[in-house]
Image: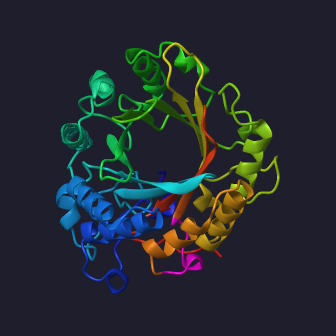
Amino acid sequence: MELLPELAGEVTGDPERRGVATLGEFTSGQLQRLCAVAGLGPEDARTYADVLTGELGPEAGRRLDLPPSGRTFLSDDHTPVEYSLAFRPDGPPDLRVLLEPGCGAGTLEENGRAGLAAVHAMSRRWGFGTACLDKLEELLLPPSPQGPLALWCALELRPGGVPRVKVYLNPAARGASRAGATVREALERIGHHWAFEGLPEGDGYPFLALDLGDWELPRVKVYVRHSGLSAAEVGELSRMPDGPPAAELREFAAAAAGTGRADARFSGLPVLSCHSFTDPADDLPSGFTLHVPVRDYVRHDGEALDRAVDLLSRNGMDPDPLLRALPALTGRRPRDGVGMIAYLALAHQRGRPPRITAYLSAEAYAVRPPTG
């Protein structure tokens, strides 16, 4: 979800590796294979593949022997799709797909309008409300928006063909210097009047996310960027009562980044903390997630995979679906590129067991070469 400098310009596809498949054909194939990995049946897989290509709109028909039509902050190679597997100790992983519905729009404002229209179409199709999003439309989707994104949509895929929906918005839409004030006002507009005071300090607010639809406890989530922290300092980021112990966060951060030391600093892409609020009467988060951009701290995906398998095994989670997920996405060997595993995240939510999530890149347009 952060662009690396060496892939921030225009990238080109690989005709020999990708053939002449379109973006929609390529990503829908990946998604159907991932559905099998996550235990979803063929009918659900086909349904969700159709949803994905539908939400990509005209971009789904774009040939992969052409460069991407525009830059997107969603992935390093500008593919407007990312996958994730959320692991827990007591069952198969949850499969999610993150996409940018307005990815083919000419301007960021048009991108936001297209994304908003897509979410409203989803609400009619699946019968959920958008009241929280509607309260924030003028604030977070203003005319002439700034920043790297307008609106992203995540679908958590469930049996039965009806996903849970999340929307990601840009707190810097009115300017990066006003992002904190924008987050505060957004939280107040949807009833969380004291939530902003429960956030840790950071150097930016990359996302504000809303759960829409069939969620047991819908959340509003605030992401905070933390540049240059050490693993020891990462351990102090949670503000969740009875949340993860500092030692657990330090150990996860050090293991994901491969430092092995609590005083080693994250000198590359910054870690992100995510703070979830469910009860407007509570000024402290009910959930906390630590996101480590593992791809910037490994030589190749083989190392990232080894670290992910180790963390899953340590926490009593079956790593086999992740081992099967990478071949479902690509024919290349893990050591022949870096970035397929983009982030590793440790999530705590009140009343639920901890989860570890692996965020997986589609790599439709480019593979970042290994660094060693």
Is-magenta flag for residue 334?
A: yes
- The quarter of the picture where the C terminus appears is bottom right
Would residue 333 be found to the left or right of residue 19 on screen? Answer: right
The quarter holding residue 201 reads: top right
The quarter holding residue 241 reads: top right
Would residue 317 be found to the left or right of residue 217 on screen? Answer: right
- Vertical arrangement, residue 135 with respect to residue 87, above or below: above
User: Where does the image place residue 147, in percent across and percent down from the top left?
Assistant: 38, 39
- Residue at 44% over, 20% down: 187
User: Where does the image place residue 312, in percent across and percent down from the top left?
Assistant: 67, 58
- Vertical arrangement, residue 15 with respect to residue 84, above or below: below
- Residue at 72% over, 43% down: 249
Q: Is residue 298 visible?
A: no
Region in magenta: 332-340
- Vertical arrangement, residue 195 with respect to residue 120, above or below: above
- Residue at 36% over, 48% down: 155
Q: Predominant secondary structure in magenta?
A: loop
User: Where does the image place residue 24, in percent across and percent down from the top left?
Assistant: 25, 66
- Residue at 24% over, 44% down: 111
- Vertical arrangement, residue 160 with respect to residue 298, above or below: above
206 and 321: which one is in front?
321
Residue extending farthest to the bottom is 16
Q: Is residue 315 visible?
A: yes
User: Where does the image place residue 206, in percent across and percent down from the top left?
Assistant: 47, 38
Is-magenta flag for residue 305?
A: no
